Amino acid sequence: MQVKRNILLNPGPATTSLTVKHSLVVPDICPREAEFGEILTWITRVLPEIAHGENDYSSVLFGASGTGGLEAAISSAVPENGKLLIIENGAYGTRMVQIANTYRIPNTSYQLPYGDYPDLAEIEKIIKQDPSITHLAVVHHETTTGMLNPVQEICQIALNNSIEVIVDAMSSYAGIPINLKKWGAGYLVASSNKCIQGMPGLTFVIFKKNLLNTLQENRRSFYFDIFNQYQGFNNTGQMPFTPPVQVVYSLKQALNEYLKETEAGRWTRYQQNWHILYRGLTRLGFSFLLPIEQQSKILLAVLDPEDPSYCFQDMHDYLYNRGFTIYPGKGAKQKTFRLAIIGDLYPSDLNSFLETLETYIAVRELKL
Ligand SMILES: Cc1ncc(COP(=O)(O)O)c(C=O)c1O
């Protein structure tokens, strides 16, 4: 069965392969059957391996969007007498502050304009001045701006001060190589529908196995309880609550495609795509929110053109009608729109996008 292929340049849910789309159509199965449990067992083993956390880390899946995984990590990790420091230099840092506040978890944030690079000395100072901080949360790839936060260095500072780290790697996991062993973070959260190139509906938390006792003591949420999810699955081979069955099949397919492409292969393809986009946009006259050395190189926050006739919605609609989805900005310190190259995309897709964008600029007589 052929399915129309759209080029999604929004930062996930991403363009999926035809084989991932087809993997959704499977015979009905009760998720309490052992056959289904075997798939879940395989997935939960592979997820930590992709981030080089084999042996020391386990993972749990939840039927939810990525925010659910963050809610699970934050509510399960921080004890009643703990305190969370959040690095807040984008909307997803702010989301973690909101989650902590919702659970009434004591927290403080290192707040920066969306698009400012975190100052490591400042983070160290905040930690030294407040010995009640027990946990630190940081977004790896801040999808708001396309910034790659210096997670390894931040983890180093935290670990030197006996602080456990929670990493939101929603839009980097399985795209940008991650090495949990080097980072030493306690928790890493991501979802099925971004760089994994699967369907939306599953989120997961990868966590250090030696944190299980702490997780058992800290239980705060009924559904988003890492310990309950882990123990329930270990005892029965089933997820405690109904999983999105077909999405599990498509995640299995997407993970197999990742393993076939390899970590290096995916990163190389993403880099090729990003360079085509970056060079093409530069040639057309666009400029970018972040200096190149701070960029994730999988998403570009492009500054809005100053031409008064520029209208994001008009540009979006023109491109959308031709099969390309672009994405608005999200509160960055300057007005932007965003283009991500994550997903089952290839150089020819980016070249076609640039040609269509160039035609749009010519038709509307936009000045860049
Ligand atoms: C870095 C980051 N964190 C969290 C989220 C929230 O994920 P979801 O929309 O799946 O709940 C996103 C979504 O784009 C994200 O990019």
Image: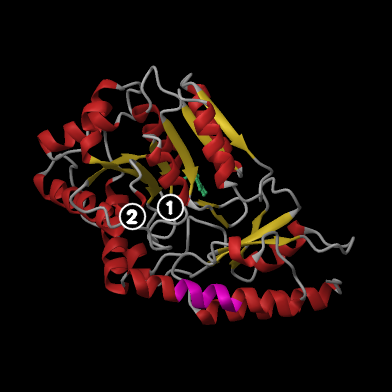
Query: Under 8 Å from ligand 1: the CB of mark 2?
Result: no
Q: Is residue 219 left or right of residue 354?
A: left
Residue 234: x and y in percent read 13, 37
Left/right of residue 102 with respect to residue 178 in the rendered view:
right
**Residue 198 spot, x, y in % from top left:** 37, 58
Circle 2: residue type: Lys
The C terminus, quarter of image: bottom right
Mark 2–mark 1 CB contact (< 8 Å): yes
List the residue tagged with mark 2. 182
* Residue in front for this viewpoint, 158 or 294: 158
Picture quarter with the N terminus: bottom left
Res. 69 in view: no
Residue 152, disc: 1
For the residue labelled by badge 2, is the local secondary structure a helix, a strand or a loop?
helix
What span is colored magenta in the figure? 269-276
Answer above or below: position of 235 versus 61: above
* Residue drawn at the location 74% of the way across and 67% of the way down: 287
**Structural crowding at the residue carrying mark 1, measured as other residues with C-alpha within 10 Å and reported as few (<14), some (14–19) or many (≥20):** some
